[in-house]
Amino acid sequence: MARCNKSLYAILGVLSKGEMSGYDIKNVFNKLGKFHWSESNAQIYPNLKKMEAKGCVTSRLDEASGARQCRRYQLTDTGRQNLIEWLEEPCEFPLYREEILLKLSLGHNLPIEKLIAHVEHYKAQLNERLLFLDEIDKHIATTHAGKPQQPFLELVYQHHRLVLPAKIKWCEQTIAALKSKITVGA
Amino acid sequence: MARCNKSLYAILGVLSKGEMSGYDIKNVFNKLGKFHWSESNAQIYPNLKKMEAKGCVTSRLDEASGARQCRRYQLTDTGRQNLIEWLEEPCEFPLYREEILLKLSLGHNLPIEKLIAHVEHYKAQLNERLLFLDEIDKHIATTHAGKPQQPFLELVYQHHRLVLPAKIKWCEQTIAALKSKITVGA
DNA sequence: GATCGCATGTAAGTGGTTACATGATTTA
DNA sequence: TAAATCATGTAACCACTTACATGCGATC
């Protein structure tokens, strides 16, 4: 990853939708970011403070909601400007690390049955995600209905709707190919 | 990423194909790992020493090839056993960070034209990779012909043959959708 | 009275990158 | 003689995760 602190911009980005607490931000990543972005508490809370020091966000203690400690953050004009500048920069192409592909490329060190099990497991995880997409779609259609981000979220999830089945198809082909290897070898 | 040092096993894995120098290992990642795994020199060289201390690899100075300094490493039985144990463990599902999707999900902060440019750029990169696959296929068919890893490498690259077009298709759909937004808005 | 969800945070460690430094040998 | 390739390595830095710590309020 390059020196640019994408976590910071990701957090600013979430805040562009309105005032939020650290906890709220975390939840956005847990739900919407599920398949393409996430941040841990250890990133969110210190970064919020850092950005407040730099004048990108302001905060206030929300006394209303049950007298519980809850600090809500809001983008400043500076923050929004910084965010937009980053958003306009060209995207870096991600360097994936696909453990399943690494292990498969070293397949000559394992019995075929083990490899098949790995691919089956991968396929199961992909299918799980595919099911989860329905849930996310519902979430978008309810929580984000009519909001400016709605159409963009839909485009993002369409990505997974196309890519997950392609990966699942590869699993099926690969399992078949590995199985035929056993048969031929036997 | 979990605490397990996958870099270490990736390097052991490459060494499972035979005696190699650090430089050779780097080249394997540069070529074969291109789309699914890579390691930098700053990972390879210190890790090789670490593993030699642990008895996973042995090394010798290769005086033959031009009297140049060249240390070649080889897996020990311990190393191979460690590798196999790791290979047998279930794969972790990777947490992607797709910058393009993050930016698109924050699309309400940018003019549509900028978003289209981002997706076009992404599509161009995907197409480049698709072309590069032909090169890799040739490389596998020549350098790895008849070797035990060959069929597994072919399966790995088949993954990209299926996934890249799905992503490209998404780009096309997305660009069309964004363009129609302009037309409707105008 | 226990447990769950809300809410904020930190310590410690590691995984990983970038960029640089060095120098021999081969090829143009 | 310049450039490319072979070959090894380190310093510095930062991004990131895991695991833990804390405590209130609501619900069961």
Image: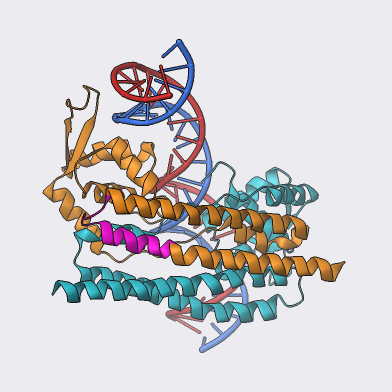
Chain colours: A cyan, B orange, C red, D blue
Picture layout, residue B77 above or below residue A178: above
Q: Does B147 sit above or below residue C17?
A: below
Q: Is residue A71 left or right of residue C1?
A: right
Question: Residue A32, relative to residue B28: is it above or below?
Answer: below
- Please tell me which residue is depicted at 55% across the width and 77% down the height of the picture: A133
Closer-to-camera residue (B26/A54): B26
**Which x, y percent locates residue B146?**
21, 55
Start and end of the magenta stretch? Answer: B144-160
For residue A56, side relative to residue B66 (left or right): right
Q: Residue shown at 70%/55% (left/top)?
A: B117
Spot occupied by residue D11 in the image (x, y as percentages of width and height) = 42, 26
Residue A138: quarter of image: bottom right
**The image quarter in which residue B184 lies:** bottom right
Query: In the figure, residue B171 lies in which quadrant?
Result: bottom right
Q: Main secondary structure of the magenta part?
A: helix
Q: Is residue A121 at least partly visible in the picture? A: no
Q: Position of residue B7 (x, y in %)?
A: 33, 48
Looking at this view, is B106 or A39 the one in front? B106
Placement of the C terminus of chain A among the 4 image quadrants: bottom left
* Residue at 18% across, 28% down: B61
